[in-house]
Image (cartoon, rainbow, N blue to C red):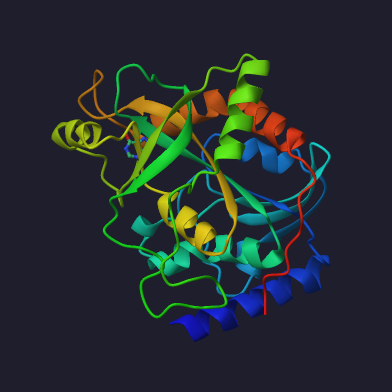
Amino acid sequence: MPTHQVAALRELRATVERSIGPVEAPIGLVLGSGLGAVAGQIENAKRISYADLPHMAASTVPGHAGELVVGTWQGKRVVALSGRVHYYEGHSFTQTVLAVRLLAWLGIDTLVVTNAAGSLTPTMRPADLMLISDHINLTGSNPLIGPNTAEFGPRFPDMTAAYDPALRALALEMADKHAIPLHQGVYVGLTGPSYETPAEVRMLGLLGGHAVGMSTVGEVIAARHMGVRVLGISCVTNLGAGLGEGVLDHSHVAEVAREATDRMTRLVASVVGALPELPVHARAK
Ligand code: HPA
């Protein structure tokens, strides 16, 4: 329902600006598993719980708090989504990208998305980081399905360089400079919430994937639709089913993500700190 989407976003943006004033942040952060600590490092932070924002669904996943945080980090104005909602929680695909659309309408130029993912290759191990070079959307859906909302972007957005080449180059440069090991690869997005079978993990590897997860692809499609540049980084929490010993367990996934937090945070911090001055856009109508 595009009309509803536009109306919802207008109301959302107005609520944010009424409670904390103009946001004017060129950088948006989706703090997925492994980057939650950033929310506590933002200086002069103004916070709004998703529960106090109209139309925003609260996440039901433990470890995904659910608040919007605006302030300064690494000397840059940022607006962060601490916690995201997933398709598998029962929300529509459109609902899962509402917060990213809000960031675009608040004016961000660049979005940094992070997530937890399973490795599809034995060379990428738990607690490793992977720079997302591209994705394969195997969710069977797309947040742009339905009449196109021209206020957001074109009907058929290009996805050739969905993960911005200049941002990727900067991330690689910063990883090298700070001696943070960083793989590169293709992220496969599935709905979950069941983990994959070993046969599916083998298939996803054959299809060209390097990591698999249950988020991100919808957010990136919505961001690209609105002309936002994207940098994506996965925290590898486990070997995909069948590639390692034992079975997969969310509490273990969350624990490894916490372990990798420090490296993920340092990497993203160095990238954000090194970003040139970016424009704040006036996208909203
Ligand atoms: N599969 C899907 N999503 C995940 C995984 C996985 O192995 N690990 C963390 N998120």
Q: Is residue 82 above or below residue 12?
A: above
Total numbered labels:
0
* Quadrant holding the N terminus: bottom left
The quadrant in which residue 263 appears is top right
Q: Position of residue 27 (x, y in %)?
A: 70, 50
Q: In the figure, is residue 183 to the left or right of 111?
A: left
Residue plotted at (17% across, 36% down): 203
Q: In the figure, is residue 103 to the left or right of 116?
A: right
Residue plotted at (67% across, 17% down): 177
* Quadrant holding the C terminus: bottom right
Residue farthest to the left, as pictured: 199
Residue plotted at (65% across, 79% down): 10
Residue farthest to the top, as pictured: 179
The quadrant in which residue 90 appears is bottom left
Residue plotted at (28% across, 51% down): 138
Q: Position of residue 11 (x, y in %)?
A: 65, 79
Q: Is residue 2 above or below residue 94?
A: below
Considering depth in this image, is 281 or 128 the residue closer to the camera? 281
Considering depth in this image, is 275 or 241 the residue closer to the camera? 275
Is residue 238 among the parts visible in the rendering? yes
Q: Position of residue 117 (x, y in %)?
A: 40, 35
Q: Can you tell me which quadrant of the image ligand 1 is in?
A: top left
Q: Position of residue 25 (x, y in %)?
A: 76, 55
Q: Is residue 105 above or below residue 212?
A: below
Is residue 85 among the parts visible in the rendering? no
